[in-house]
Image (cartoon, rainbow, N blue to C red):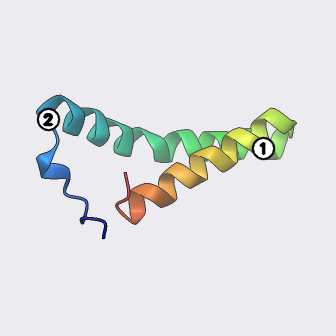
Amino acid sequence: MRRKYNPYLLPSWARTIREVGKQLIIPFTIFQGIRTLIIPTTFDVVLLLIFLLIVALFQIDLI
């Protein structure tokens, strides 16, 4: 059985990187969404989907 994820067990540098990523992913996703609406290329759509997946993983505390 899988143990529950506890971010406090991470080293301090990993917690810092995780918190910075948590703060920056929403603005990057919004910017990428606007960019995808203006100039929709395959790369933009794939990047937006990756950003949305990362946001979802942060919300359900898997990362």
Q: Is residue 6 above or below residue 15?
A: below
Numbered-mark total? 2
> Which residue is found at the position 20% from the left and 39% from the top?
15
Q: Residue furthest bottom?
A: 1
User: At which x and y percent is residue 40?
Assistant: 86, 40
Q: Is residue 15 visible?
A: yes
Name the one closer to the observer, 17 or 24: 17
Q: Is residue 51 above or below residue 59?
A: above
User: At which x and y percent is residue 27?
Assistant: 50, 42
User: At which x and y percent is residue 57?
Assistant: 46, 57
The residue that mark 2 highlights is 11
Secondary structure beneath label 2: loop
The residue that mark 1 highlights is 45
Name the amino acid, label 2: Pro
Secondary structure beneath label 1: helix
Splitting the image into 4 quarters, where does residue 19 fall? top left
Q: Is residue 32 left or right of residue 28?
A: right
